[in-house]
């Protein structure tokens, strides 16, 4: 059963919401498909606990003051202060439990790539989230992907390597890179130098083909 949080309706709107924040109250809105938006508020401490426990897109229930039934929702957007990163506002999206929703789900890389230690490779992070479609109750909060299998230079992991539960569909293209082992700079430079040297040697060999014939001595005539 989804965890339940209590919210009250909000009459303080717009720029006046700053007063609520000073009082330790966080403003929010509930909206959904075919629904009128409802302005709500909840204690900042509970809002931070909600985000810490569930993050975005996880199904929870909101008990709205004055309403007899709980609303199934997901946190769809969090507005933060650009400098302090303090939470300023929450948007809750009310869902239909029988209707799939789409959401961007973060990807967390775990473990250590052997190629980093063996070849001094550089672990490059690719896309850090994927687009997912699932029923609200089955939407994952995140994906975990181990990089332990990256044993060679240029090895990579893509969206296709994610383990997906039944009922969850990844909408992002399967070939998108999530992690890759890049060659260390010194190796890349050495390979470029080798390629240049090989090219120069080839040019010298081609130029030497006409020098094999003996040169005519002074006074000796050559026939046309």
Image (cartoon, helix red, strand yellow):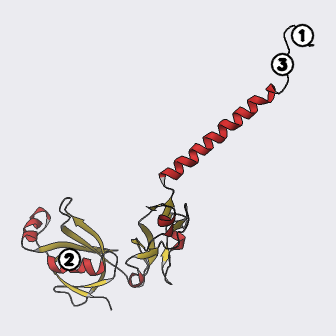
Residue 142: assigned label: none
Q: Where is 95 relative to 199, above or below?
A: below
Please tell me in which quadrant of the rendered image residue 55 appears: bottom left
Crowding at dot 3, Cα within 10 Å, few <14 / some 14-19 / many 20+, comes out as few
- Place of residue 97 in the rendered image (x, y in percent of width and height, measured from the top left): 38, 84
- Place of residue 28 in the rendered image (x, y in percent of width and height, measured from the top left): 20, 72
For the residues marked 3 and 2, what is the alpha-carbon distance in whole angstroms? 90 Å
N-terminal of the pair, mark 3 or mark 2, is 2
The residue that mark 2 highlights is 48
Query: Of discs 3 and 2, which sits in the foreground?
Result: 3
The residue that mark 1 highlights is 220
Query: Of discs 2 and 1, which sits in the foreground?
Result: 1
For the residues marked 1 and 3, what is the alpha-carbon distance in whole angstroms? 10 Å
Please tell me in which quadrant of the rendered image residue 29 appears: bottom left
Please tell me whether mark 2 sits on a helix, a strand or a loop.
helix
Q: Are the two marked residues, 2 and 1, in contact with CB atoms closer than 8 angstroms? A: no
The residue that mark 3 highlights is 215
N-terminal of the pair, mark 1 or mark 3, is 3
Q: Quadrant of the N terminus?
A: bottom left
């Amino acid at each position: 059963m989804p965890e339940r949080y209590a919210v009250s309706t909000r009459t303080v709107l717009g720029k006046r919401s700053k007063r609520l924040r000073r009082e330790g109250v966080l403003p929010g809105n509930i909206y959904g498909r075919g629904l009128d938006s409802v302005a709500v508020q909840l204690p900042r401490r509970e809002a931070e606990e909600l985000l810490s426990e569930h993050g975005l897109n996880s199904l929870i229930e909101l008990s709205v003051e004055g309403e007899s039934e709980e609303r199934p929702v997901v946190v769809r957007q969090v507005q933060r202060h650009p400098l302090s990163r303090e939470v300023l506002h929450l948007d809750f999206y009310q869902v239909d439990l029988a209707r799939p929703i789409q959401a961007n789900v973060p990807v967390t890389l775990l473990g250590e790539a052997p190629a980093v230690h063996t070849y001094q490779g550089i672990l490059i992070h690719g896309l850090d989230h994927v687009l997912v479609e699932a029923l609200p109750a089955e939407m994952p909060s995140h994906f975990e992907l181990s990089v332990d299998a990256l044993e060679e230079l240029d090895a990579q992991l893509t969206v296709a390597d994610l383990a997906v539960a039944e009922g969850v569909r990844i909408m992002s293209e399967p070939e998108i890179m999530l992690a890759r082992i890049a060659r260390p700079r010194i190796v890349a430079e050495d390979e470029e130098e080798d390629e240049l040297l090989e090219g120069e040697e080839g040019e010298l060999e081609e130029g030497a083909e006409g020098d094999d014939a003996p040169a005519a001595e002074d006074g000796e005539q050559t026939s046309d």
